[in-house]
Image: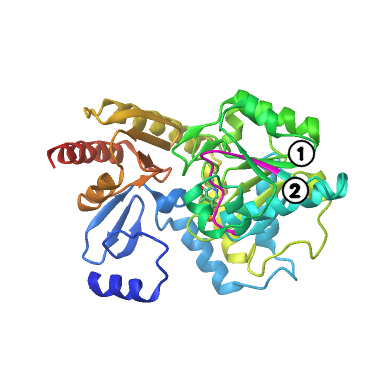
């Protein structure tokens, strides 16, 4: 069976992913089950998506009710779920208004367009420069790829959107040199995910805020991975006291269904007119019902406190692992990276054999993004299994 599904996929689906050698059919809480009944403890959350675990009863009920009532109608009409979700997102953040879309890349893409229109409306057509940072990841669509400083991702697709320059992450002086009168926006992840779990210093974000204010540029936080409670606060920027003008959100927002959102302040929203941007599916009633449930649950102080406790425990236990290959354990809340002096991929593969879903972030960083509902018994199991895996790697 695995052979036939894998063969069919490889024959008919474009090869843009390296896939694990099993077929998943079912998920429940912290575990997923493959077609042979083998269970896997999930420390990946579908890349930071399943914040409440798999098949959460409240999400399932909201989706089932809405899909039977009105599943799609497009943005020519008003619907209550979209209005309610937009209100909830504004009430729990810096934002005054929300633009809905269907993915993280699209949320970044919208922020690029908003920044360009804002600069053109407030200053003129020459203010088009964008500054982003090394190690950042913002997506794979044309615009979001252009602001993602990774040669391997960009090279086959040049020429990319012009006007983008990159400074080293957390380097205040280098960023201040690049941000000037021609800059329309600065894009940064408060905690870099794909780039290896690197936390922006509060001084760095504050310096970006100052430079943006000095030159009338918009500061954009990409919280697609680090937002929605992942770091122990609802938004990662809350750790720093610096607020952005725009913020891209996606991944966990839908609890497993696809949604993106670009959160903006009123002065940014004001420049956008009907027809300037849009999407057929965006902000549909079913996904907005699901997202309302997720946002309500991950905003609860008890859950956020749980993320802090579990994140500290996870880091502590990883640090205690007796492997000489561990160089550093770092992270915020349940966004944790373990830097190794060996490749992470063999550990991921060994994890599959031992019933564990793990992620990497770059070649040498093992990345852990469990559902936020993870508990101590799951962490115990992870650590015991990693212990075995790390000694197997040495024996091989
Ligand atoms: C995943 C991710 C994106 C892209 O989101 P997609 O939904 O895959 O398009 C952008 N920025 C960050 C920080 C991400 O983690």
Cα distance between the residues tagged 2 and 1: 8 Å
Q: Is residue 97 left or right of residue 48?
A: right
* For the residues bearing labels 2 and 1, Cβ distance under 8 angstroms: yes
Alpha-carbon neighbours of circle 1 within 10 Å: few (<14), some, or many (≥20)?
many
Residue at image position (21%, 37%) is 390
Q: Residue 143 in the image: state x and y as whole percent.
A: 63, 55
Residue 115 numbered mark, or none: 2
Q: Earlier in the sequence, mark 2 or mark 1?
A: 2
Q: Residue 317 in the image: state x and y as whole percent.
A: 30, 29
User: Can residue 241 be seen at all in this image of the molecule?
Assistant: no
Mark 1 within 8 Å of ligand 1, using the beta carbon: no
Q: Residue 164 in the image: state x and y as whole percent.
A: 66, 45
Q: Residue 187 in the image: state x and y as whole percent.
A: 64, 41
Quadrant into which the N terminus falls: bottom left
Residue at image position (79%, 65%) is 275
Q: Disc 2 on helix, strand or loop?
A: helix
| Residues shaded magenta | 130-141
User: Can residue 298 be seen at all in this image of the molecule?
Assistant: yes
Q: Which residue is mark 1?
A: 217
Q: How is the image coloured?
A: rainbow
| Of 279 and 253, the residue lying toward us | 279
The answer to whether residue 137 is above or below residue 394 is below
Alpha-carbon neighbours of circle 2 within 10 Å: few (<14), some, or many (≥20)?
many
| Of 266 and 88, the residue lying toward us | 266
**Quadrant housing residue 141:** bottom right
């Amino acid at each position: 069976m695995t052979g036939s599904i894998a063969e069919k996929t490889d024959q008919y689906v474009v090869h843009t992913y390296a896939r694990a050698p099993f077929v998943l059919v079912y998920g429940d809480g912290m575990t997923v089950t493959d077609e042979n009944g083998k269970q896997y403890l999930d420390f990946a959350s579908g890349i930071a998506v399943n914040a409440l675990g798999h098949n959460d009863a409240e999400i399932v009920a909201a989706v089932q009710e809405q899909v039977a009532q009105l599943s799609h109608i497009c943005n020519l009409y008003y619907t209550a779920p979209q209005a309610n979700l937009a209100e909830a997102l504004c009430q729990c953040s810096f934002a005054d208004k929300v633009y809905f879309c269907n993915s993280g890349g699209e949320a970044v893409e919208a922020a690029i367009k908003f920044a360009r229109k804002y600069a053109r409306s407030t200053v003129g057509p020459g203010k088009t420069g964008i500054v982003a940072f090394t190690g950042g990841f913002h997506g794979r669509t044309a615009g979001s790829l252009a602001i993602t400083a990774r040669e391997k991702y960009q090279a086959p697709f040049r020429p990319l959107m012009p006007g983008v320059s990159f400074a080293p992450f957390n380097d205040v002086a280098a960023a201040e040199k690049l941000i000037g009168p021609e800059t329309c926006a600065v894009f940064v992840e408060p905690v870099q995910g794909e780039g290896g779990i690197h936390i922006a210093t509060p001084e760095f974000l504050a310096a970006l805020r100052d430079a943006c204010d000095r030159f009338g540029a918009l500061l954009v936080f990409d919280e697609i991975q680090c937002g929605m409670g992942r770091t122990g606060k609802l938004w990662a920027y809350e750790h720093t006291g610096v607020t952005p003008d725009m913020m891209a959100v996606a991944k966990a927002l839908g609890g497993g269904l696809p949604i993106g959102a670009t959160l903006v302040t009123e002065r940014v929203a004001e420049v956008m007119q009907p027809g300037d941007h849009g999407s057929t599916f965006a902000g549909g009633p079913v996904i907005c019902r699901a997202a309302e449930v997720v946002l309500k649950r991950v905003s609860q102080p008890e859950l956020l406190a749980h993320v802090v406790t579990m994140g500290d425990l996870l880091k502590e236990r990883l640090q205690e692992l007796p492997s000489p290959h561990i160089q550093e354990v770092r992270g915020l809340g349940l966004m944790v990276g373990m830097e190794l002096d060996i490749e992470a991929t063999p550990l991921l593969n060994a994890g599959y054999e031992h019933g564990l879903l793990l992620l990497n972030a770059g070649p040498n960083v093992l990345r852990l993004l469990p559902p936020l509902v993870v508990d101590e018994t799951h962490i115990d199991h992870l650590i015991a299994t990693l212990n075995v895996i790390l000694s197997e790697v040495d024996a091989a």
